[in-house]
Image (cartoon, grey):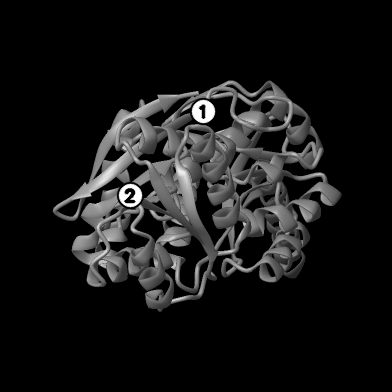
């Protein structure tokens, strides 16, 4: 009996080992997709919006099932907080590289995307920014940098042209937050404004942590411009517009996508109705999958999206599309497949030029009425 029991135990052990090996052979390969944006600080609501978009993409792909090169793959979102700070961004980028991601959706700000891009370049990992608009980001000659939004070289002129032709602006004061994004957008706006005959009465710089703009606004009030162009994010642009109204400034406030958020009415109050802002992409309700995406986003996160969620969502799918075409989860092979991207998603058709910029960008212009964002015009590039 003792011998028989021993044989039975050995047989059961062999079966158990065989079963474990069989399960391991069919176990899903876990592939990490990186994401980085400010998840803390004044614009954390925009970073979280982006993270939610990327997370929704990962969840939907996993629910449907993904096979790459004959192997079942489970995606895992590796999201790192860069706090909207250039130094923190390089640390977040290095953490993602160390985590062995296949690609990254990030960063949100131009001032974080540009320094982080060197980390990804050195590691040979594709970087798709969901929001960075400064032209310099893709002008570095890196084969790893891509973006799914138009650039400030397109957004600034579109905003200036609308100001001249539709708002009949003759004079403008410019204020920027001295970041790569805010200053870059303001400079592009200024060049086009001057070429269209708009007189720039002043150009001031503040910073991205400022909360009190009364000194600048008081001086601008004395200049009496038709409009004020503000280059920065909603966390500062909202209070700027609010204080301008409180001090009796009649000028319209012009701004870019950083200000053009769903949260602006909370930050600017009724002064949001005086804002005209641009976004470096198609309006949500005009995106091919925009309305359905907004509903899925609302159902999943129980809040309306801000700005960048659809762009982050599509960026995840574009990385996965490159893996599928490469039939590999190797970062180098995924990167090699990126130039041939032709992907149709929520934001529309995405294909890239040699620098990694969109081949067919769009600028949308908005205002606010009774606390709600309203589309004014769409400029196809």
Q: Position of residue 199 (x, y in %)?
A: 46, 45
Picture residue at 53% right of the left edge, 70% below the top: 206
Assign the N terminus to one quadrant of the image: bottom right
Which residue is most to the right? Answer: 122
Residue 127 lies in quadrant: top right
Give 32 or 215, whichever is nearer the viewer: 215
| Residue in view at x 76 percent, y 57 percent | 97
Above or below residue 346? Residue 30 is: below
Residue 55 drawn at (x, y percent): 47, 51
Which mark is first along the chain, 2 or 1? 2
When the figure is inspected, residue 295 is found, relative to residue 324, above or below; the finding is: below
Q: Residues within 10 Å of mark 1 (few under 14, many from 20)?
A: many
Badge 2 element: loop
- Tell which tag, 1 or 2, sits nearer the viewer: 2
Report which residue position mark 2 lands on: 226
Q: Nearer the viewer, residue 221 or 359?
A: 221
**Residue of label 1:** 361
Image coordinates for residue 373, horizontal then vertical, percent: 24, 47
């Amino acid at each position: 009996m003792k011998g028989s029991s021993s044989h039975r135990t050995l047989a059961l052990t062999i079966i158990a080992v065989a079963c474990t090996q069989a399960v391991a052979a069919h176990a899903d390969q876990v592939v990490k997709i990186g994401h980085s944006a400010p998840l803390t600080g004044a614009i954390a609501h925009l970073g979280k919006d982006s993270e939610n978009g990327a997370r929704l993409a990962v969840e939907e792909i996993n629910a449907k099932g993904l096979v790459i090169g004959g192997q079942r793959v489970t995606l895992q979102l590796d999201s790192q907080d860069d706090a909207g700070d250039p130094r923190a961004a390089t640390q977040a980028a290095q953490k993602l590289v160390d985590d062995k991601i296949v690609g990254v959706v990030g960063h949100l700000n131009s001032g974080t995307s540009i320094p982080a891009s060197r980390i990804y370049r050195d590691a040979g990992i594709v970087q798709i920014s969901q929001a960075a608009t400064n032209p310099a980001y893709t002008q570095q000659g890196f084969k790893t940098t891509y973006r799914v939004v138009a650039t400030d070289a397109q957004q600034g002129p579109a905003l200036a042209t609308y100001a001249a032709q539709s708002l009949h602006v003759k004079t403008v004061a410019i204020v920027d937050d001295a970041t790569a994004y805010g200053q870059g957008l303001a400079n592009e706006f200024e060049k086009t404004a001057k070429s269209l005959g708009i007189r720039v009465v002043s150009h001031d710089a503040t910073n991205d942590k400022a909360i009190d703009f009364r000194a600048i606004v008081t001086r601008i009030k004395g200049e009496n411009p038709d409009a004020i162009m503000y280059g920065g994010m909603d966390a500062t642009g909202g209070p700027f517009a609010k204080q301008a109204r409180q001090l009796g400034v009649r000028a319209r406030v012009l701004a870019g996508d950083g200000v053009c958020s769903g949260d602006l009415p909370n930050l600017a109050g009724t002064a949001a109705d005086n804002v005209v802002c641009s976004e470096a992409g198609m309006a949500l309700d005009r995106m091919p999958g925009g309305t359905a995406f907004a509903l899925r986003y609302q159902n999943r996160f129980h809040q309306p999206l801000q700005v960048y969620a659809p762009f982050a969502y599509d960026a995840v799918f574009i990385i996965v599309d490159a893996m599928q075409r490469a039939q590999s989860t190797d970062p180098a092979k995924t990167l090699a497949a990126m130039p041939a991207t032709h992907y149709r998603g929520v934001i529309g058709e995405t294909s890239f030029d040699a620098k990694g910029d969109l081949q067919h960008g769009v600028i949308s212009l908005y205002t606010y009425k009774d606390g709600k964002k309203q589309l004014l015009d769409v400029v196809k590039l």
